[in-house]
Image (cartoon, rainbow, N blue to C red):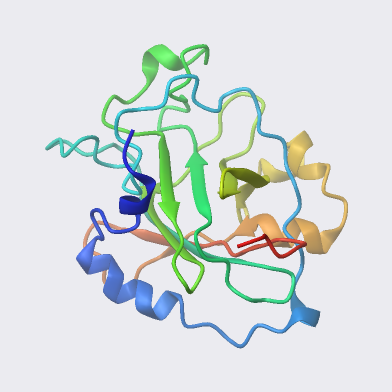
Amino acid sequence: MHDVHALSNRRLFLGAMAFGAAAFTTRGVFAEELVLTPKQTEGPYYPDKLPLDTDNDLLIVNDAITPAVGEVTYLTGRILDAKGDPIRNALVEIWQVDHEGAYIHTEDPNHSKHDKNFQGFGRFLTGSTGEYLFRTVKPVPYPGRTPHIHFKLRKSGKELLTTQCYVKGHPNNERDGIYRSLRDPKSRDAVTVDFAPIPNSRIGELTAKFDIVLGFTPEA
């Protein structure tokens, strides 16, 4: 397993970071505007065996030449407390299916179809601005679930939040029981993310921004 303190510095995607600078420039955050990110189930497929590579580039495994198949997505956001202040040293974990709808979990029914070039799980340690960045693929549906990405946040070894984000406008959202369990429209909106084309991208890359707001201020 990699040293988590190195995760935010490894493979910084130089081309994406020019875009990322603009993505992180947002309107002022005021506490009265913030909607707390709702908790969501972890589900059964948090990796039972963590990959040897757990950095924030899910498209390349251990510096392999062949990248994963799928719509390349730069997934960004900030981890904030209830006052809108950034949370430093939060360990952000994500896991999701590949383009075939398969998790890396060995008991996933689709595991035999898993794209060996897709890492399936990644980590990022936030800095003073609370920002995170992952390069991954746009999630796809699989039987029983609308497209989504799982998130787990930890700080100083303590779990802060487990949640999921969803693809805005996907027709399966309204048929997904976990998504529909969020009856408050503001809570739904808080986890519904626009996967938008990056202007002038030659390979059709996407960007998705998902800010996570915690209902408390973690201890330093």
Looking at the image, residue 142 lies above or below residue 199: above
Q: Can residue 215 be seen in this view?
A: yes
Q: Which residue lies furthest to the left in this view?
A: 65
The residue depicted at 76 percent of the width and 52 percent of the height is 38
Q: Residue 3 falls in which quadrant of the image?
A: top left
The residue depicted at 28 percent of the width and 75 percent of the height is 18
Residue closer to the observer: 64 or 220: 220
Looking at the image, residue 190 lies above or below residue 24: above
Measured as percent of width and height from the top left, residue 179 is found at 74, 43
Measured as percent of width and height from the top left, residue 144 is found at 67, 26
Task: Identify the image quadrant of the N terminus.
Answer: top left
Residue closer to the observer: 100 or 214: 214
Task: Identify the image quadrant of the C terminus.
Answer: bottom right
Looking at the image, residue 59 lies above or below residue 189: above
The residue depicted at 66 percent of the width and 28 percent of the height is 43
User: Relative to residue 129, is residue 163 drawn left or right?
Assistant: right
Q: Can residue 199 be seen in this view?
A: no
Looking at the image, residue 98 lies above or below residue 24: above
Q: Residue furthest front?
A: 220
Measured as percent of width and height from the top left, residue 218 is found at 67, 60
Residue closer to the observer: 100 or 15: 15
Q: Which residue lies furthest to the bottom in this view?
A: 28
Q: Residue furthest right?
A: 183
Measured as percent of width and height from the top left, residue 134 is found at 39, 53
User: Relative to residue 149, is residue 68 drawn left or right?
Assistant: left
